[in-house]
């Protein structure tokens, strides 16, 4: 089945809200909250901001578009739908701990920590090679879990600062293979527009 266009995922907030059944509150973000919801037959994550803030709706659209374009690359959550008129995003729920809680949970397991960082590195590389910069990589935006086969997998959330890379930078990254030093630096929390 062909991937849906971004525009096909835009819906009025009312339609989304009536289908999102709260399971429990997951976390608070810097601009809103994140809930685990039951949404049209699947577990999902609902990120929502202040409904009166129209600028925030634009920011959510930008974030949702980046997630849609990445289509799971770099472990980005899959986008399920986004409200046209309010800051609401429904996306894939990523199981696991954020990196700081993972470190606490696996305190004495250095091998698990190294595997998590190695997995994170691969995901960042994947994002950079596709021509994007996450722009807000920190402990809270990295979700790590141990799979049933014992593999440690890191994934990224929060694509609010994600941007496409200028083509000349991308070219340099491909040619030298290490231009991502700058990109990785920018990924680590340096916000740029
Ligand atoms: N798709 C997701 N699956 C699981 N947890 C998530 C997901 N998206 C966000 N979270 C949790 O909610 C927190 C806040 O979400 P985030 O997108 O980072 O909001 P903000 O942009 O306000 O920082 C994250 O740090 C993470 O713990
Ligand atoms: Mg965040």
Image (cartoon, helix red, strand yellow):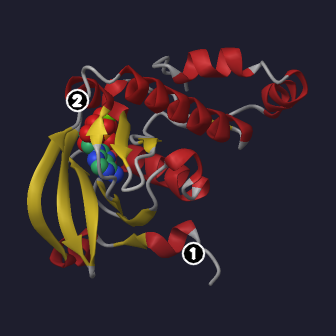
Quadrant of ligand 2 in image: top left
Outermost residue on the right side: it is: 175
Q: Nearer the viewer, residue 85 or 89?
A: 89
Q: Which residue is mark 2?
A: 101
Q: Nearer the viewer, residue 111 or 70?
A: 111
Q: Position of residue 39 (x, y in %)?
A: 24, 74
* Element type where label 2 sits in the image: helix
Residue found at x 59% / y 71%: 5
Residue found at x 24% / y 21%: 107
Q: Position of residue 186 (x, y in %)?
A: 57, 19
**Residue 163 visible in the shown view:** no
Residue found at x 57% / y 59%: 71
Q: Nearer the viewer, residue 84 or 78?
A: 78
Q: Nearer the viewer, residue 143 or 66?
A: 143
Left of 112 or right of it: where is 51?
A: left
Q: On the rendered image, what quadrant is the N terminus found in?
A: bottom right
Q: Is mark 2 within 8 Å of ligand 1?
A: no
Q: Which residue is mark 1?
A: 4
Tell which tag, 2 or 1, sits nearer the viewer.
2
């Amino acid at each position: 089945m062909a991937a849906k266009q971004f525009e096909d995922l835009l819906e009025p907030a009312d339609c989304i809200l009536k289908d999102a059944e709260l399971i429990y509150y997951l976390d608070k973000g810097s601009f809103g909250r994140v809930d685990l919801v039951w949404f049209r037959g699947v577990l999902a994550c609902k990120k929502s901001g202040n409904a009166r803030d129209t600028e925030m709706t634009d920011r959510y659209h930008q974030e949702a578009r980046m997630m849609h374009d990445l289509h799971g690359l770099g472990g980005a959550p899959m986008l399920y739908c986004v409200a046209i008129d309010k800051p609401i995003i429904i996306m894939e729920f990523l199981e696991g701990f954020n990196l700081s809680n993972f470190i606490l949970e696996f305190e004495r397991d250095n091998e698990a920590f190294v595997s998590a960082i190695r997995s994170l590195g691969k995901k960042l590389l994947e994002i950079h090679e596709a021509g994007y910069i996450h722009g807000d990589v920190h402990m809270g935006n990295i979700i790590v879990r141990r799979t049933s086969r014992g593999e440690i997998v890191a994934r990224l959330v929060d694509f609010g600062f994600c941007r496409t890379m200028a083509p000349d930078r991308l070219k340099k990254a491909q040619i030298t293979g290490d231009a991502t030093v700058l990109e990785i630096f920018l990924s680590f929390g340096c916000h740029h527009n």
